[in-house]
Image: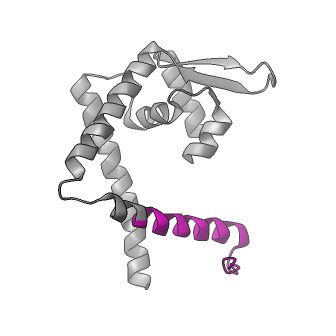
Amino acid sequence: MKIAYLDTIRLIERLHRQFLEVVKGELDRRGTQDINNVQGLILYNIGQEDLTVGELTNRGYYLGSNVSYNVRKMVENGYLTQERSPHDRRSVRVKLTDKGLTLWKALDEMFDRHLTQIAPGYTNEQDLTGAIGSLRRLERFWIAAGEFGVRIPPPAA
């Protein structure tokens, strides 16, 4: 079990790095030099929404300081606009500009291309759904481990 557990952790790390390289490759093919792969994923996760940096951090599981830095860079490069929330002046809301929406569409098209390429032999929806279930259970375990330390209560029946 320990070998499988540690292999899973290594695979998650490796997959994330490899996926970031795929996004970087897409940005490079488009000639997009003013945004990096991590910023591209943050931009994609914002999508059509109007979010606070806190909401983005909670949804994307990004580190708060990294999100703030990356949001600032994307605002400077014209991908996002930001404005103070009218309801809570401490909160800043961000949304895509036309330039950001253009990149979002390009990334969405990349995902669509991936779907047509992945289906014929790499995996299928059932396999992906099973993997998602396993990874979500692992996520819940890690959340509990972080909250409760060594003595993790068993999952509710």
The residue located at (60%, 32%) in the rendering is 68
Residue at 27% in and 33% down: 26
| Residue sitting farthest toward the front | 126
Q: Nearer the viewer, residue 39 or 66?
A: 39
3 left or right, relative to 79: left
Q: Is residue 141 magenta?
A: yes
Where is residue 138? Give x, y as percent: 53, 69
**Above or below — where is 32 with respect to 4?**
above
Q: Which image quadrant for residue 32?
A: top left
Residue 89 in picture, x, y percent from top left: 80, 22
| Main secondary structure along the magenta-highlighted residues | helix
First to last magenta residue range:
130-157
As drawn, is 68 to the left or to the right of 31? right
Magenta segment includes 140: yes
Residue positioned most to the bottom: 1
The colour scheme of the drawn protein is one colour
> Residue 23, position in %: x, y?
32, 38
Kindly indicate the quadrant of the structure image that contains residue 56: top right
User: x and y percent of residue 61 in the render?
Assistant: 57, 48
The image shows residue 96, relative to residue 15, as above or below, that is above
Residue located 49% across and 23% down the image = 74
Residue placed most toward the observer, 122 or 5: 122
Compared to residue 16, the image places residue 148 above or below, namely below
Where, quadrant-wise, is the C terminus in this rendering? bottom right
Q: Looking at the image, is 128 positioned above or below residue 44?
A: below
Report if residue 148 is visible in the image.
yes
Identify the residue shown where x is 34% and y is 65%. Answer: 127
- 104 sits to left or right of 33: right
Asked whether residue 63 appears in the rendered view, the answer is: no
